[in-house]
Amino acid sequence: MNHPLAVAFLLSALVTAPAYADARGDARRQVEFGIAVAQKGLWREAIYRWQRATELDPTFAQAFNNLAIAHEHEGELDKARAAYEKALQIEPSNPLIKQNFDLFKEINDRIGRKDGR
Amino acid sequence: MIALGARTVASFILIAAASGCSVGYVEIPLETPIQPKIDVRPFSRVFVAGFITAGSEEVDGNLETVRLLRSQLRNKAGALRVIDADALALADLAAPDNGAAPTGATSGAAGSPPPPAQATGDTTVSDETAFAAYDKIFADKDYWKKVGEELQQPLIVTGTILFRPQQRSGFVQRERETFDSLGRRRVEPERTYQERKGFILRPSFIFIDGRTGETLHTETFREEILYNANQTTPPLSSYFELMDRLLPSFLNTLTAQKVRGSRTLLK
């Protein structure tokens, strides 16, 4: 009784997996290219690549994380926050994303640190 | 057999998925630019005009702050030229019982050049609660417009500085080093009652448009420091230590700053 179910599950997995793998594979290539250009200081190009990656695969937390960092580099702090939040929404327990976001928040706190009289 | 095959394939898919999720990473240095809070493009000059101060009489909060901010702005304010005119004796000008308080057209002071601090002496008020009585000078557009006209319409920085001693006693946690009978070192947290003294610094910086006399931005900070009661630290040294903490935020009001750090890019 279980066998037909298992076969059906496997078949559906095999049918959908290539499409997912293609999207993730393309997104991964964009992410890696983005990292390479960011390391050369070409952050606008990196933003374009990581944005493309998030469009190809909207569940790719790493792409959102990198996009957030690039926005930080460009001083676009609202966009950086949105991207970090998206990355953490996808992977809430990823320690590296959490660490990046904490460092980002520390800067934000420093900017806003004041005491109203 | 089919079930076994399904399990094998499922395991394969899981391993493949897991390996696909394995995260490579690259740490990268990052300089985050922080945009200034005020658009200073209309100004070519900045004038740190002076401050009304309260608290410790051992530190001249007005002159020390004017000196410190001017030197910082000279190095870090980019295209803004720092005006080296004498600091204003704002407490004297704005004293509640001073009939010559500068209230624009109704006052004689508005028509005359601002007197320098050195000429009029003390700029310290009795305590911080007295600051409110002096607020009118910061809102006096005509006065600041006049000051601006004298100095080619700069951006004007003024405000209040509270720097006062504080004393606090209570339990603090510190680490205690002990050695057991075998000579092994141990460090344990220990709560002890301590008398401590230090200082509170609470500056309020007001940025005024020298063309119109209008306040553009106000920013208030609070910093404090406490030392062991036995420790003797000169008030001026504490003042600089506390100012040092808030200078980046002060400068960021006028100039773009870069915060250095690093982040982790993920593959």
Image (cartoon, coloured by chain):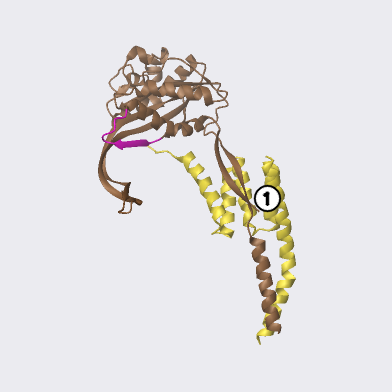
Chain colours: A yellow, B brown
Q: Is residue A107 left or right of residue B58?
A: right
Asked which secondary structure carries label 1, the reply is: helix
Residue A55 figure quarter: bottom right
The residue drawn where x is 53% and y is 26% is: B76
- Total labels: the figure holds 1
Is residue B162 in view?
yes
> Looking at the image, is B177 positioned above or below residue B196?
below
Three-letter code, disc 1: Trp
Is residue A62 or residue B180 the one in the foreground?
A: B180
Residue in the image at 73% along x and 59% along y: A25
Image-based side of B208 in relation to A73, left or right: left
Left or right, A57 with reference to B140:
right
- At a point 59% along the width and 59% down the height, the residue shown is A90
- Up-down relation of residue A11 to residue B221 (above or below): below
Q: Would residue B227 be counted in the magenta stretch?
A: yes
The magenta stretch spans residue B170: no
- The magenta stretch spans which residues? B221-233
Q: On the image, which quarter does residue A115 sit in?
A: top left
Q: Position of residue A13 (x, y in %)?
A: 70, 72
In the picture provided, is A52 more to the left or to the right than B168?
right
Residue under numbered circle 1: A50
Q: Quadrant of residue B54?
A: top left
Residue A116 spot, x, y in % from top left? 39, 38
